[in-house]
Amino acid sequence: MGTVAFLGPKGSFTEAAARAILPNETHKPYRSIPDCIDAVKENEVECAVVPLENAIEGSVNITLDYLIHHQRLEMVAEVTAPISQNLLVQNQHSENWEKVTTVYSHPQAIAQCHQFLRKYLPDAKVSLTSSTAEAAKLVSEMDKGISAAIANDISAKEYGLTIAKSNINDYENNRTRFIVLKSGNFNTGSFMRSNTESNYKTTLMITLPSDYSGALHQVLSAFAWRKINLSKIESRPMKTGLGNYFFIIDVDMKMDDILIPGVRDELKALGCGVEILGSYPCFQWEALTMNGSVK
């Protein structure tokens, strides 16, 4: 058995995802996404589960940027899970939640519930935390005033809070991709279950030559004429000056011996930098739950 880092504390969405995809490992909370990634690199744990992208708010930039610029790890699996945000308060405030003066949560959760906050708690101060579970923990420890956390129902149970309002996210189809990152020889067979069907994805990082006109068009053409489907293309700053970007591209196929290596070689011939960040199975929360993976 190995140890899996997750964005904590206990009760976070990330913990639920970690337990779904790696149910047989030991799970250890860390305070931030960089801390989770560092723990893998420093051999404190065998792998980490961190949020990568939300259907409403897009990519979790701290995950991408830290992974690219600071600690490069291999992407080895992902699980996509439904996200339902709730307004949590201490039990004695369940009837007067509209008097909440401060709302605590992760920045993405706050953004996902913008319309609710604007309509029902327009005067409440918003205070950002490292995770939704951290927000719930903070609110549970408050001894003055009326505060609330935006978090999941697992956090409510974990920290003894009441769900004052449920499903407060602005859009119903709220889902998050969580990625498993590893370094070294951790056995990924823990989540390669024969009874759980999954699709595969390959993620590439591509940098463009600065003096090549139409380079991005050439990059996309290299995938297009091979009939390789791209499910995502996103630019992120290189942090070396304005106008300098790298691209993260998700390909809907497993790393093979011909097509993707052909793309890589063609792009390198154009002067592009190409890195394969991982080729991995992609699971849905519902399938893992149906197969008894969630404990």
Image (cartoon, rainbow, N blue to C red):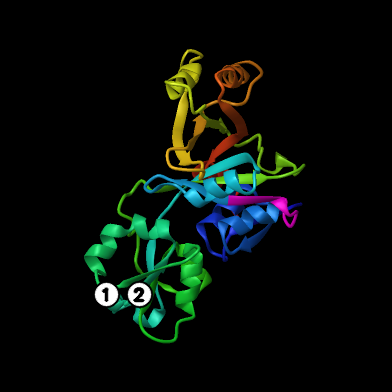
**Residue type marked 1:** Glu
The one of 142 and 42 positioned closer to us in this rendering: 42
Magenta highlight on residue 45 = yes
Q: Quadrant of the C terminus?
A: bottom right
* Residue at 41%, 59% in the rendered image: 107
Q: Of 227 and 81, which appears nearest the observer?
A: 227
Snapshot quadrant of residue 105: bottom left
Q: What's the distance in space between the residues labelled 1 and 2, CA to CA?
A: 11 Å
Secondary structure category for the residue under label 1:
helix
> Could you tell me which residue is drawn at 47 percent across and 13 percent down?
225
Say few, some or many: other residues with alpha carbon within 10 Å of mark 2 (under 14 / 14 to 19 / 20 or more). some
Of badges 1 and 2, nearer the viewer stands: 2
State whether residue 73 is above or below residue 109: above
Within 10 Å of the Cα at label 1, are there few (<14), some (14-19), or many (20+) other Cα atoms? some
In-image side of 129 versus 57 (left or right): right
Which residue matches tag 1?
98
- Residue 166 locus on image (x, y percent): 35, 63
Q: Position of residue 2 (x, y in %)?
A: 74, 52
* 146, above or below 127, in the image: below
Q: Which residue is mark 2?
A: 102
Which residue lies most toward the top here? 225
**Residue at screen point 40% across, 86% down:** 144
The x and y percentages for residue 40 are 69, 52
- Kind of residue sitting beneath label 2: Thr
Horizontal and vertical percent position of residue 194: 66, 34
Rendered image: mark on residue 264: none
Q: Secondary structure at mark 2?
A: strand
Q: Which residues are magenta?
A: 41-49
